[in-house]
Image (tube, helix red, strand yellow):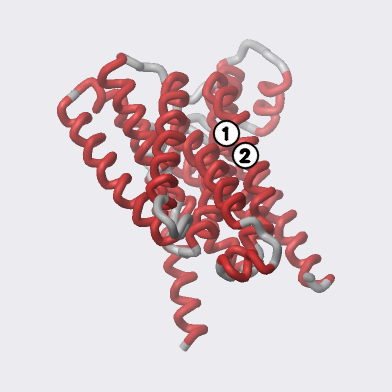
Amino acid sequence: MDSPPARLRRWSGWLLAAAVLALACLLSLLVGTKSIPVADVWTALWGDDGSPDHLIVTGYRAPRTLIGLLAGFALGVAGCLMQGLTRNPLADPGLLGINAGAAFAITIAVAFFGVTEITSYVWFGFAGAALVSLVVYRLGTAGRQGSDPVRLTLAGVAVTAVLSGLTKGLILLNATAFDQMRQWDSGSLTDRGYGVIAGAAPFIALGLLAAVLAARSLNALALGDDLAHALGVHVTRTRLLTAAALTLLCGTATAAVGPITFVGLAVPHIARWIVGPDQRWIVAYSMLLAPILVLTADVLGRVVIRPDEIPAGLVAAFLGAPALIWLARRARVSSS
C-alpha cells in the first residue's frame, strides 16, 4: 500500500501533468504559420464568424490537436504495456511487429489498390497490425513451453525485419507508393481530418480500457510467472489482454499518424522515474506525458523552419532522446 504522502505526491504530479497537457493543447491551437490570439481561438471554437481564423482553427488545428492527443494516449500506454509484457526496459511498441505490420499493409493498399486517402490508411493499417500481432504471438507461444517474453521478443524482431524489408522494397519499386507514404512514414499530424479521428477513437478507447484492466496484473507478472501464479494472476489471460491492448493502441495510432516510435520508449522511463515501478501509476502518467511530448513536438515542428514544417515524429525523437540519456546517466550514477 502507498503511504498517504506518496499517494498525495503522485496525485499532485498527475494533476500538474494534466495542466501541462491542457497548455500544450492550447499552444497547438494558437501557434502555427499564423499565430492566433486566445480570444479569436475561443470565438472560432464556439461560433462561426466567417473569418479565415475560424477555418484555420476548426478545419486544421483542432483536428490536428485531437489526433495528437489520441496518438499520444495510445503510444505512451502501449510503451508501458510493451515493457511490462516483455520485462524489457528497452522495449517499444514496435517490438512485436505492430508498426511494421501497419506499414506493410498500408504500402500494399497504396501500391496495388490505389488507396490515396488517409481515412482509408487507418483501416488497412489496423488490419495489418492486428494480423501481424496474432502471427507474432503464435510464433512466440508455439511449443510446449507456452508463452515466454524472450520468445515473443525474438519473434517480433524477426517479423519486423522481414516486413520492413518488404515494405522498403515495394516503396522503391513503386514511385506512387513512395510519394503517398512519404509524409505518413515520417510520423506527421497534418491532413488528419475528423474522419480519421472518428475512426481511430473507438479502437484507442477500447485499448486504454484493456490497458487499465491489465495494469495491476502486470505488477505481479514483473516478479516472474511462478510468483504471479502464486499471487493468483492468470498469466496467459493477462498476456492475451495486454497483447490485445497493444494491437488496438499501437496499430491504430500507427495507422493514423505513422510510426512515431520514440514516444513509446522514452515516456514510460520518464514516468517510472517519477512514480516508481507500479504499472498502474506508470500507465496513468504516460497517458498524459506522451501526448504532451507529441503535441509539443508538433508545435515546435511548425515554427522551427516556418513557413515549412518538420514532422512531429522527427521532432519527438530530438526531444525525447536527451531526456532518456539523462535518465540513463542518473541510473548509472546512482548505481555506482
Q: Mark 2: which secondary structure?
A: helix
Residue at coordinates 56% horizontally, 16% vertically from top-left? 52
* 15 with respect to 167 (left or right): right
Label at residue 315: none
For this orientation, the residue located farthest to the front is: 144
Residue at coordinates 35% horizontally, 40% vertically from top-left? 100
For this orientation, the residue located farthest to the top is: 50
Which quadrant of the figure has residue 159?
top left
For this orientation, the residue located farthest to the left is: 173
Question: In the rendered structure, which disc, 1 or 2, sits on the residue that comes first in sequence?
Answer: 2
Label 2 belongs to which residue? 25
Which quadrant of the figure has residue 218?
bottom right
Residue 57, image x, y percentages: 59, 24
Badge 2 crowding class, 10 Å Cα cut-off, few under 14, some 14 to 19, many 20 or more, is many
Residue 304, image x, y percentages: 40, 43
* 112 with respect to 130 (left or right): left
Residue at coordinates 15% horizontally, 27% vertically from top-left? 173
Label 1 belongs to which residue? 65
Residue 192, image x, y percentages: 49, 25
Badge 1 crowding class, 10 Å Cα cut-off, few under 14, some 14 to 19, many 20 or more, is many
- Amino acid on which disc 1 is placed: Thr
Between 317 and 286, the one lying in front of the other is 286
Residue 289, image x, y percentages: 59, 52
Work out how far the residue at label 1 is from the one at label 2, CA to CA, in angstroms: 6 Å
Can you see residue 292?
A: no
Quadrant (top left, top right, bottom left, bottom right) of the N terminus: bottom right
